[in-house]
Image (cartoon, rainbow, N blue to C red):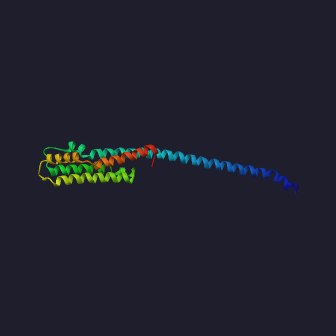
Amino acid sequence: MVTILEILKYTLPAIVVLIASYLIVQKFLVSELRRKQIALLHETQNITIRMRLQAFERLTLLMERVHPRQMMPKVYNSAMTVSVLQQVLVTTIRTEFEHNLSQQVYVSREVWESVKTAIEQEIGMIHQIAQRLSPDGPAKELNHYISDYLMSQEDQLPSEIALRIIHEEARRVLSYGAV
């Protein structure tokens, strides 16, 4: 009986120290793992925010480039006909849009839908105005009618609405981080 008590006298404190050490080490490892996960999350968020902001920049450039006021001086040539200018305008818009298709990954559905809608409405506006004119007429007529249409618009143009939505979301991302 004395030997059992002697053994217990040495083993019991060792077991208590072992359990305490195990709990301390486990708590440390768990907290260290959480700290590393939080650091990785912050790093990932910073990269994601940068990519989203670049997407907002590219979509803003897209909306500016396809705006008829910006696009017309670049593509208009007085030797063109109405149908050729119409085709060049629509092709330019579609090319710009296709070049930026990948940006939809980084923006909200609302932003992407507003960009798509603006593109479709800009193309529709060009077709609608061109249908009123003779396809073989001088491009100057289409240029003139598009300019008149833009001047007569009391509401915002589709590209301006899309720009406003892009700017609002970019502001939210800058203010609150990844949404």
Q: Residue furthest right?
A: 2
Q: Is residue 23 shown left or right of residue 61?
A: right
Look at the picture and state if 124 lies above or below 67. below
Point out residue 121 in the picture as x, y percentages from the top left corner. Answer: 26, 53
| Pick the front one: 16 or 71 | 71
Total numbered badges shown on the rendered structure: 0
Q: Residue furthest front?
A: 154
In the image, 171: left or right of 18?
Answer: left
Relative depth, front residue between 65 and 22: 65
Picture coordinates of residue 82, whole percent (x, y) = 15, 50
Image coordinates of residue 103 in percent, x first then y, are 36, 49
Q: Residue at x 84, y 52 (%)?
A: 6
59 relative to 44 in the view: left or right = left
Q: Residue furthest bottom?
A: 1
Horizontally, residue 172 falls left or right of residue 151, namely right
The N terminus: image quadrant? bottom right
- The foreground one among 167 and 51 is 167
Residue occupying image coordinates x 24% and y 52%: 123
- How far across and down, in percent of the image, does residue 20 sit? 71, 49
